[in-house]
Amino acid sequence: KEETVEVKQLLKDERTHKIAGSILLLLAFLFFIAFTSYLFTWGEDQDKFSYRMLLANDIKVQNLLGTFGAFISEIFIRHGFGVASYLICTTFFVLGINLFFGKKVFSVFRNIKYLIIGLPVISVAAAAIFKGSQFPWGGAAGDLIRDWMYKTVGEIGTVAILIVAVLAYVIWRFNPV
């Protein structure tokens, strides 16, 4: 006789939560290693980037996580938000820890707030600070927003907005006297 498994019961089972938490923690670790390796190997792996690299066995890359690491790093860092992409690792980590332990160890809501605000602010700041650098510190999103802000409010206005954004965060978070 086959045992019937209901989806509702499966989703409530603590073992499912621990497995999902473990997978998210693994993703956080793998993304962190891939992004960190990309900081050192991007120049050698950049010309090999294509969607084919995920399935091909003949492509050799220098990223510590192989073609998967080179691919996700290229997507998130060069074509995404630059070094601000490390915030994605923290989100996987927070979700994974909370699911694995079955309780609220870290605030998911707070982490999502930092992710939503931090991705564009850090990306634009990195793109503005390292403008002209070969490495995509701000990623494509940071470069795009920086260029738009330069056209709209100028370079001085962009820097002023970024300084006020950081100052507002410090005031909101720490409330200095």
Image (tube, rainbow, N blue to C red):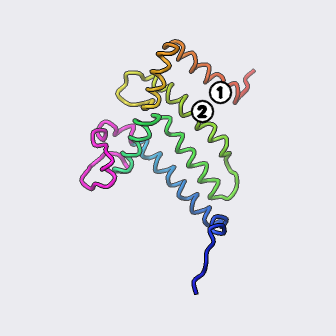
Q: Residue furthest right?
A: 177
Tags 2 and 1 in contact by the CB under 8 Å rule? yes
Q: Which residue is mark 1?
A: 169
Q: Is residue 34 magenta?
A: no
Q: Where does residue 150 sit, x and y in percent of width and height?
A: 47, 16
* Residue 87 appears left or right of 167: left
Amino acid type assigned to the residue bearing label 2 in the image: Ile
- Residue 150, relative to residue 55: is it above or below? above
Q: Residue at x 50, y 35 (%)?
A: 84
Amino acid type assigned to the residue bearing label 1 in the image: Tyr
Q: Is residue 40 magenta?
A: yes
Residues 120 and 70: in front is 120
- Residue 94, relative to residue 5: is it above or below? above
Q: Residues within 10 Å of mark 2 (few under 14, many from 20)?
A: few
Residues 87 and 116: in front is 116
Q: Where does residue 172 sit, x and y in percent of width and height?
A: 70, 27
Q: In the image, which residues are magenta?
A: 38-65
Q: Residue furthest left?
A: 58
Secondary element type, mark 2: helix
**Mark 2 or mark 1: which is in front?**
2
Q: Residue furthest bottom?
A: 1
Q: Where does residue 164 sit, x and y in percent of width and height?
A: 62, 19
